[in-house]
Amino acid sequence: MLSPRTVSYAFFSLVVASQLIPARADESPAQNKVIVNDPDDRLSSVPTNWWTYSHQSLQDVTNTISAQNARVVDFTVEQVAPSLTLTVTYVENTGPYFKPWLWYAGIDAPGLANAISTNNARLISLKAFDAGGGQIRFMAAMIVNAGKDAKPSWSYTDLTADQIASNLAANNARLVQISSYLSGGKTHYAAVMVGVAAGDPQFWWYTGQTPAQITSLLSANNARLIDLDYTSSDGSYNAVMAGCGTGGCPASWWSTGQTQSQMQAMAMQNAGRIIHTASYAGCGGLCFSFVLVDNSLPALDGANPITSRVGQLLRAGGINGVQGLYLKQVGGPVLANLLESFVYEPASSIKVLAHLYAMTQVQNGAATLADSIQQYTNGPESCPDPAQPGGMEPLSKALQEMMWHSDNARTREITDTYGDSMINAFGLSIGMQNTNINHIIGCGGPVPDQLTLADAAVLYENVASGTLLTPANQTSFTSLMAGKAQFQAEGYDWTHLWDTDIPAMIAQAAPAATPTQRRDYQNMMNLAYKAGNYVICSDSCGHVAEYYAISGWVEIPFCSGGTPSPQDYVFGIFVHGATDNSYNSTKTTVATQNFLTAKGELLREQITAGLSSCGLAP
């Protein structure tokens, strides 16, 4: 690699966001799995390691390059005084992304032209900024213009939009990047372009667009974004997009006006790689506009198709917010996972923690299921605050109503009997590192309850493996939960996994089996789970944020030598903070539909495999 060259500015500390927040994703038209191996970084979707950091000093950039074997692919200047700080996007400089390269900070236009000529280089990122007193300087990343990377290349500063168009026509070129800046009270542009080559997709570029206009243009052009520049003078955007053609584009996403944590959340949610960022003042600090391209590993998709399949069901229909999923064999491997460590609002699904704590008290001899506890009469769907005392009822009845019918008043009976602090401490003691009951369940609160799919799996797996409960208490634990036991007693189960989803999957996987064979197979299964949801509304519930979650345990029979034997799995999905701005009580929102579609789908492949092992499925 050629040595980086910089102009020195004062050091400024690095800031990296932690907690993820929901973000809006605007997706490209084509979401099929397309891998493009192109020498140009923004056109390629070959998976690689990448990083985006904000508030980086020049020393931070140097350190990141060294520590990560990284190469800069995009800059944004955040501030000039009292020291230069940047938002920087990198890729690992290896494999198909390896390129000899250089970067410059604070270079003027003549110096930039000299650097390009001296190093036989071509620019891949060029951002202008006013260094003070009207002195326009540039951040530049360039690669050696040789071998597979060789292209006719031109770069310009101090242009109008009309001049960009003229130069593109004169050079028979396409835009790689456009960057606007203010000088003398007017908007000027820096532009990087390369010659049009055979096999290149079609390209378009636009200035002064709103996000809605860009969305419309992407649809009309059947294209994806590769550059999205923010114009500080009027808040509009300049965009460069590449056509998808008949072969389709890699999946891509973009968004504007997001915080850094929202940007990180979208990248994680979609297994994407940031190829362009623009940061600017706002959003309580910095706002970000950015473009993502699919960065998921084909090998991972092939080895773990459940994550891809169920993830697509959860993300369908332009949903926003955050979605996650998790499937693990008890005592075995993780079979599907997406954001299993994301801390989400679990709604009533967290009631299983109170249920398990009560069952451990029974096991330890501190209580019996026949013990009488104070009954509250607020009602199943109430906010039981204040609690309305009635008579007394058995602990088993309170647990059953809490877990079968999600009764909020019964839940408060349990949490008042044992105490939230004791229940939370118990969860931590068994390895639930990010789980807390923070308010009266059913009432919401200023501090949301907290759960992760990984923590829920810890609870269910420790029960299924016999680590926490004896076999007799395991049976009591599951029989008091929604699933098979509730169906046997009441003819349905709370979220309809047992009475609807599982029979449908069995019928689809084993169409040639008789109804009796299918029923007998399901009867050998077992299932216990807890689901929940909140709809938090404003403006008379015209605007809502929705939270759905389910987690549980399932026992699926597999046959060996004609003898069925069970395999146990723990599973969960969530939809967190999906918003709808035209809500009404009769509407089935995207979040609701996606949850209802996906809630049982993590079990499909295992049920199919079990049926096949027993000779009931092809």
Image (tube, rainbow, N blue to C red):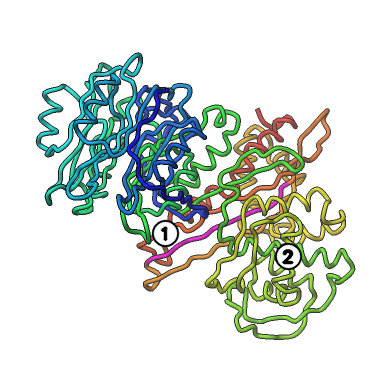
Mark 1, Cα crowd under 10 Å, few <14 / some 14-19 / many 20+, is many
Amino acid on which disc 1 is placed: Thr
Task: Verify CB contact (< 8 Å) between mark 1 and mark 2.
Answer: no
Q: State which tag comes first along the sequence, 1 or 2.
A: 2
Label drawn at residue 579: 1
Mark 2, Cα crowd under 10 Å, few <14 / some 14-19 / many 20+, is few
Dominant SS of magenta comes to strand
Q: Residue furthest top?
A: 147
Vertical placement of residue 173 versus 104, above or below: above
**Where residue 510 sits in the image (x, y, percent)?**
65, 34
Secondary element type, mark 1: strand
Q: Quadrant of the C terminus?
A: top right
Q: Is residue 20 left or right of residue 466?
A: left
Which picture quadrant has residue 507? top right
At a point 64% along the width and 83% down the height, the residue shown is 387
**Where residue 425 sits in the image (x, y, percent)?**
73, 65
**Where residue 284 sits in the image (x, y, percent)?**
37, 61
Q: CA distance from mark 1 to mark 2?
A: 33 Å
At a point 86% along the width and 71% down the height, the residue shown is 368
Taking the image as drawn, is residue 484 in sight?
A: yes
Which picture quadrant has residue 383? bottom right
Taking the image as drawn, is residue 320 in sight?
A: no
Q: Is residue 528 left or right of residue 322?
A: right
The residues colored magenta run 543-554
- The residue that label 2 is drawn on is 425
